[in-house]
Image (cartoon, helix red, strand yellow):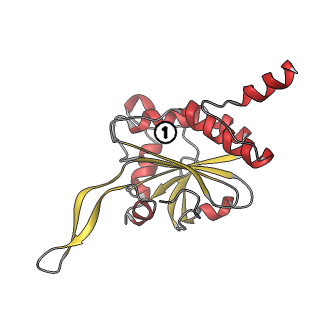
Amino acid sequence: MLLGKKAPHFKAKAVVNGRDIVKDFSLDRYEGKKYVMFFFYPLDFSTLCPTEIIAFQYRIAEFEERNCAVVGCSVDSHYSHRAWLQTEQKHGGILGVTYPMVSDLSKTISKNYDVLLGHYSVNENGEEIFIGIPEACRGLFIIDKKGIIRYLSMNEMGIGRSVDEILRMLDAIIYNDETGEDCPIDWKPQQKKQEAQAR
């Protein structure tokens, strides 16, 4: 399990600002500076995926307020990412998304983060084959400034995530880092403010 461990390192092509291709994108750029919410989704030009990707963009300011970068990743090529990023939302695109979208065409990033819906094997002829679905599930990781994975979740292909819950978990991690205090079930940042005002 990756929880509590250093996030697997990678360098890959990514599309940033909705159009610019970066050849050697890495999460290392954030280490020591920002938290990272790194999420995987199955495929570009699909039906459920854009609802999540656009929802993260709509609330990007809330992540930025928490000094957290948002980064997406799928097994599609950087060309596919850029085409999708330049397609209007009314036509199934994600135009307006500005955070980085990483290309994992080799599927090694998905494999290293243990979100790949299948695995490579060797058949009786000694040929490498893929067993399962060569796509990533809806895996999500919150990585701290030291590059350590502090939270992870995995959803099936047809089940979307909750932005509110991701932000709550991010708040809890930040609070724990800053105070060393535990965050009990359903903890929210307002709890400590309310407790302080009640005293």
Vertical comparison of 46 with 149: above or below: above
Q: Can residue 62 be seen in this view?
A: yes
Question: What residue type is disc 1 on?
Answer: Ile
Q: Nearer the viewer, residue 169 or 105?
A: 169
Q: Which of 77 and 171 is in front in this view?
A: 171
Vertical comparison of 45 with 5: above or below: above
Q: Nearer the viewer, residue 58 or 37?
A: 37
Outermost residue to the left: 124
Outermost residue to the right: 199
Outermost residue to the top: 198
Secondary element type, mark 1: helix
From the viewer's perspective, is 117 left or right of 38? left
Q: Label 1: how many residues lie within 10 Å, few (<14), some (14-19) or many (20+)?
A: some
Relative image position of residue 33 (x, y in whole percent): 74, 56
Q: Nearer the viewer, residue 178 or 129?
A: 178
Vertical comparison of 63 with 193: above or below: below
Tell me which residue sits at (47%, 59%) in the image.
Answer: 1
The quarter of the picture where the C terminus appears is top right
Relative image position of residue 35 (x, y in whole percent): 67, 51
Relative image position of residue 86 (x, y in whole percent): 47, 43
From the viewer's perspective, is 85 left or right of 186? left
Relative image position of residue 125 (x, y in whole percent): 11, 80
Q: Name the residue under label 1.
A: 53
Q: Can residue 88 be seen in this view?
A: no
Tell me which residue sits at (78%, 29%) in the image.
Answer: 192
Disc count in the image? 1
